[in-house]
Amino acid sequence: MNKQHERTPQGSATKRRTAGRKNFDTAPTIISGKNYLSSYLDDCYHHTCLSLYQNPPIGEIGLEEFEVWAIERLKILNEIDSALKRNKPFQEIELIVLPMLNKSLPLILSKDQDKNTENRRKDYYSHFILKLCFSRSAELREKFVKCETIIFKVRFESMSGVEQRQFVQHMNLPWEYITSAEKAEMSQQLYTSIQPSLRFQLNLTDEISRRDYFEKEEFIKIPFEYVPELISSRSVFLKQGHAFVPKFQQINLLTLEFTGNLQKTLISTSHAFPTLDEEDRLIPILNHLGAANNFLEDDSVFDELMNSEVNSVTVKSTKITRNFPLCASHLMDGLTSAHHLKYLARKQFSLFLKWIGLSVDEALKFWASEFTQTMGMDKFEKEYKYNFRHDYGLEGSKIKYKPWDCRKILSQPRPHAGEYHGCPYRDLSKDSLKAQLKSMGLKDEEVYGVLEINSKGDPTASCTKVLELKTNGLVNEIVTHPNLYYDRMRVYHKKLDDTEGETAAEAES
Ligand code: SF4
């Protein structure tokens, strides 16, 4: 690690423990005028823009890079996870993920070798850092393998044919491209073996297009034990212990190799994790990364909202409530019908409202206007005012309380009858949820889609799908926080309002 970035305030004992400690024994050195790190990464990426991440990273990085790079990759993994949960096909996921990869973890090779090395370092390190984070439970390992495999496939598909071939050749697999003469010799058998796949997998419905495709297709010769699935589905030609696999199937073989390797190394990482002597340096960062889904780590997200126009009256207007996630709408419904909320619901809603821009004075007016419909002002002031002021850090310990994220909301006791806290995607019956979704303006087929996702038991996946539907597919971000949902809806509606305003102005002029 680069010591200028070390964050070890615990004193000299810590400094002694970390001083001189390096991540790996091998630090980059200059060999024969060529940077060793650059050469090492060339090998790890097989001189292309794809890696199987088989060797440990080398060289030093700062703690800041350690954290920032991992968070950037984590955002991409979360997008993939969210898309997978919403049953998106690979082609759609690819459209979301490729631009993110090109922006945050670009691996497109350029003539500038230093730039290539820097990009690869970031990609390589971020993969291994998250491998550490995700190795800690079977569920996390499974998620990591699924998401990293998608990244692998997206990158492979974006490579040119020449690069793909180069990558396969460098992988040291027992594969071999057959020559044109060999292909001509087995032409009939090869065509017969792949014809059903051309028809049903690649959707080539007429014979002429299938023949055309076959003429251009390359074949790989591989020991038959590598392709048991293709053999059992009789979709590959076998001869003398070898299977002849068309190139369009090779991504499946590569994926098997990639996932097998990743699963093995994740297990060995999980075994090594308890012996990691990093309590003072890396473990806190890894723990933080584990919680990096927490949208609220970044207070700046709310700066703009704190200056917004939400007040005791507008907070109940459609302009504001149309941005609410279902949990907030449910709380507002409960409050306006019962003119009271119990402790957990008050806390959940009060903090949510605070962070969408409701100031303390306006909040007190808002809560009083509801509560005093069933009680006197005296009682409100004596029994409730203090708690609302407390939420704003004006009483007691004067802590700047943050609103609850989905994880915190879901960790609270489930609501009983007459209680409104919690997450409706988890707590409402199927019929009540269906009614709520319809009242949000979703079409019948959209409601059924959300209910199907919800039946899998992940409320945030349902909420994410609703956010996507409500923004016409423009927001594909995983919902981890009610205020995140609110913010994305608010931005979406603002853009929509601006566009409509411009169109109306044009029509008038
Ligand atoms: S998933 Fe989160 S934001 Fe959505 S309704 Fe549940 S608690 Fe609210």
Image (cartoon, helix red, strand yellow):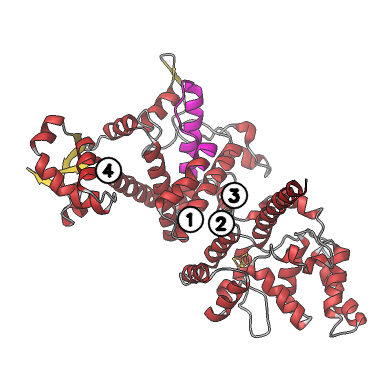
User: Is residue 116 on the magenta stretch?
Assistant: yes
Which amino acid type is marked by label 3?
Pro
Image marks 4 and 1: residues in contact by CB distance under 8 Å: no
Q: Which amino acid type is shown beneath numbered disc 4?
A: Phe
Check whether the beta carbons of the residues at disc 2 and disc 1 lie within 8 A of each other. no
Q: Earlier in the sequence, mark 4 or mark 3?
A: 4
Q: Residue at x 42, y 55 (%)?
A: 141
Disc assigned to residue 478: 2
Lower position in the chain sequence, tag 4 or tag 1: 1
Which of pointers 3 and 2 lies earlier in the amino acid sequence?
3
Tell me the quadrant of the picture where the C terminus can be found: top right
The residue closer to the viewer here, 262 or 485, is: 485
Under mark 2, the amino acid is Ile
Residue hosting label 4: 248
Residue 83 is marked as 1
Quarter of the image where ligand 1 sits = bottom right
Q: Secondary structure at mark 1?
A: helix
The disc placed on residue 284 is 3
In front: label 3 or label 1: 1
User: Mark 3 Cα within 10 Å, few/some/many (few <14, many 20+)?
Assistant: few
Provide the secondary structure element on which disc 3 rests.
helix
